[in-house]
Image (cartoon, grey):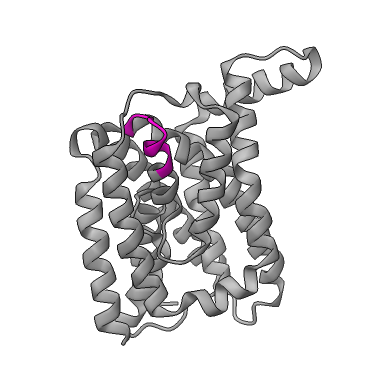
Amino acid sequence: MDSLHIVILSIVQGLTEFLPISSSAHLVLLPQLLDWTDHGLVFDVAVHFGSLLAVVFYFRHEVRRMLRAWTSSLVSGEGNQDSLLAWWIIIGTLPAVGIGFLFQHSIEGILRAPWILASASIFFGILLWVADSKAIRRRDEYTLTLKDVLMIGCCQVLSLIPGTSRSGITITMALFLGLTRKAAARFSFLLAMPVIFASGVLQAVRMVTEVSPIGWDELALGIALSAVSAGICIHFFLQLVERTGMLPFVIYRVLLGILILLVLY
């Protein structure tokens, strides 16, 4: 891959992984617009690993507390809000990981059609606007119940449809359930960690058959740029989301969907 391609795609993936605008839509559209060759499975694994590093580092204190509390709850049988949140993240991850493993080939084949990509971007963008404008935003992530988590986890399955946006659909459901914008985003980002890890493991297993892997220096560049851009994105999104709301992202998604239809058809 050309170094410029690596720089642009890594930054785009890092920025869009956690914003509610669909990273898959951008990574499909951008090479089409610029007439670039497929960046390959190795590169996909690298940039997603970079995003994982970013979210784990950003929430390192919360992750440490949850791991300690969760481990302690297994031994003592007594938990607190941190151990409960850890259990919610585990439970909320299971539907997407299970369905993704069972139907990965269908998802990568049939569901990557441009009209599906565009339709998902537009439809779920509008749904995000409805949730943001109509829902009562009073709860935080520590008030979630098992029913809430199962609903968010099942909605996360929809993110397997390219163009939906994993963060977008989980934030949408969390808003419908009454979480504040910041709490919805925080839980969505925490929920991303095991999903991105599981996806990376699955891709890494398949990567053994990759016929033309890129060099280690290019992989390192992709990981670093994706991690830095994702970390910046997480920080500023959480700082600004209560003030900006979701409307700017909704407008962007609708325009992106229209652009996909115009370019790929």
Decide if residue 241 is in sight here: yes
Q: Is residue 169 above or below residue 32?
A: above
162 inside magenta stretch: no
Which quadrant, please, contains the N terminus?
bottom left
- Residue plotted at (52% across, 47% down): 52
Describe residue 172's horizontal placement relative to residue 263 as left or right. Answer: right
Q: Position of residue 55 (x, y in %)?
A: 47, 40
Describe residue 130's horizontal placement relative to residue 96 as left or right. Answer: left
Which quadrant, please, contains the C terminus?
bottom left
Q: Is residue 149 above or below residue 158?
A: above
Q: In this view of the protein, which residue sits in the foreground, 99 or 239? A: 99
Q: Which residues are magenta?
A: 173-181
- Residue plotted at (56% across, 74% down): 108
Q: In this view of the protein, which residue sits in the foreground, 171 or 61? A: 171
Q: Position of residue 35 (x, y in %)?
A: 33, 85
Decide if residue 3 is in sight here: no
Q: Is residue 261 above or below residue 187?
A: below
- Residue plotted at (26% across, 38% down): 134
180 inside magenta stretch: yes
- Residue plotted at (61% across, 14% down): 80
- Counting the numbered discs, the total is 0
Q: Position of residue 32 (x, y in %)?
A: 34, 82
Q: Position of residue 128 (x, y in %)?
A: 32, 49
Q: Is residue 229 above or below residue 189?
A: below
